[in-house]
Image (tube, helix red, strand yellow):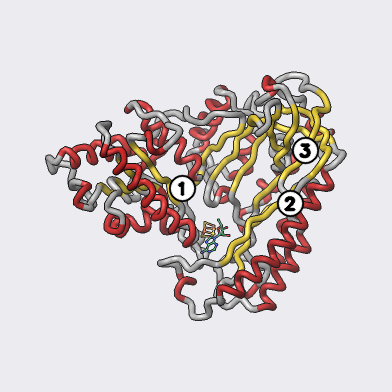
Amino acid sequence: MNVYDSARMTDVLAPLGYAPVAHPGAADLVILNTCHIREKAAEKVYSELGRLRELRDARARGDGPAMTIAVAGCVAQAEGQEMLRRAPQVDLVFGPQTYHRLPELIARVERARAGDGSGAGKGGAAANRSGSGVMDTDFPVESKFDHLPETSAQHGPSVFLSIQEGCDKFCTFCVVPYTRGAEFSRPAGEVIAEAERLVAAGAREITLLGQNVNAYHGAPPDGEATWGLGRLLRRLAEIEGLARLRYTTSHPRDMDDELIAAHGDLDRLMPYLHLPVQSGSDKILAAMNRRHNADDYRRVVERLRRARPDIALSSDFIVGFPGETDLDFAETLRLVTDIGYAQAYSFKYSARPGTPAGTLEAQVPEAVKAERLASLQSLLDAQQEGVNQDSVGKVMPVLLERPGRRSGQLVGRSPHMQAVHLDAPAHLMGQIAKVRIVAAGPNSLSGRLAAEPAGSILPMATEMEARP
Ligand code: 5AD
Ligand code: SF4
């Protein structure tokens, strides 16, 4: 989501003459787009700000224009005022829902810097040297999507499209409902139009984004009932030239019949799903307010596998949630063993300010968390490596996305999201090639071109035959 937001910020700033530079030292404006999900991510912002202050001061010793330092994203949203106090080098702080106002915000910073005082607004803009800056952490009534220019900054065959934001689920460990705000779904017609533009600009794969993407319920293009994600995917799959669709991140409770059916019916919907479960213990799932138990999750996966037998699954896990015992943790390991994941992300529980779980008494000691994380990760790593090993010898359609590290090499993705490295001519970039997998590592595959693609898109039948 932050990658997408950063690209959109670039779009907003382009008419003002801003363009990306390779190194922050060369920038007139540096924006840190931040994440508040765990303490480690949030703390990183302050060490980055220390480095930026040095760069800004070095620049100030020359005679170029001053460097403006801005902090965007969820740390800005959550800590705006405190951040301006703790890091006086910050000129501008704005949240994830207000970046369409960037031109106006930058103008306010410039006015404040010029010292005419008229930059003072909400948050109190003043000369940034005095340690106060411009702040906009509103949840505005207007949708930023109605004010953003058309997407232009995304390049490459695989692109993101944000369709839903915010979250009403209130898992007790999570800051997202507070930092990103309430659930909002973009109207279906707007999503379709943006997808068509992206495809016209060369996208072959679109990943639909949302904090809770499968809770999508967008206004319909035809004025009838709202569209769910299944319906939207069906419509997007009709866009000529669009070869692949994915979506992330989902909640198990929102995997409705229409969406599961879409996995069976739509060849362009890739057989890979990130479906976070967080824990395998019913007691912990209840304490997390996940509103499903471990067997509900198993049943959802069963239905998905009935619809699309080759679907690969991925998940997020939290170990050491307050009150988690060895037995609870063993339930997580059992669930992982039952499901079998192709990929996963796992984290030590991190107490977040303002969340209900953050103040629970029964916090788990750090050493126990570390031990559980290591044992969960070794199980997940073994599963991932097993899936990768099973790919060896198979021929699969690979969307060639970018140059590899060696010259003559390209890197792409299998339908199951595995990174595939192969030698291939640069002109195949953006195409779906048939690739024979010759070797597998823990995190990626190596392959050989099995045949050049027939056209710019393989006929559907070829994608189907090639399913591993
Ligand atoms: N501590 C640890 N992990 C967290 N996540 C969200 N909040 C926390 C937290 N407080 C993880 C969840 C979520 C992923 C994006 O980050 O697993 O799915
Ligand atoms: Fe956070 Fe996801 Fe739970 Fe929403 S559903 S509160 S984003 S973990």
Front of the two marks 3 and 1: 3
Give the SS element for disc 3: strand
Query: What residue does disc 2 label?
Result: 342
Mark nearer the N terminus (3 vs 1): 1
Q: CA distance from mark 2 to mark 1?
A: 30 Å
> Which residue is label 3 attached to?
446
- The reply to whether discs 3 and 2 touch (Cβ–Cβ < 8 Å) is no
Residue at image x 60%, y 56%?
251
Q: Is residue 151 above or below residue 176?
A: above
Residue 210 vs residue 128: left or right?
Answer: right
In the foreground, 2 or 253: 2
Q: CA distance from mark 3 to mark 1?
A: 40 Å
Q: Amino acid at mark 2?
A: Ala
Q: Residue extending furthest right?
A: 393
Of labels 3 and 2, the one closer to you: 3
Quarter of the figure with residue 192: top right
Give the vertical position of 56 relative to 449 (above or below): below
Badge 3 amino acid: Ser
What residue is rendered at 71% in x and 72% in y? Answer: 331
Residue 464 relative to residue 155: left or right? right
Q: CA distance from mark 3 to mark 2?
A: 17 Å
Q: Position of residue 222 (x, y in %)?
A: 52, 33
Residue 276 shows which numbered tag? none
Count neighbours of disc 2 (C-alpha within 10 A) and say few if under 14, some if 14 to 19, many if 20 or more.
Answer: many
Q: Give the amino acid at mark 1.
A: Phe
Q: Is residue 145 left or right of residue 455?
A: left
Q: In the image shown, does 239 or 112 lie closer to the viewer?
A: 112
On residue 184, the disc is 1
Please provide percent x and percent y for residue 55.
35, 42
Q: x, y (%) of residue 335?
A: 73, 65
Above/below status of 316 relative to 142? below
Pinpoint residue 150: horizontal percent, then vertical percent.
Answer: 44, 28
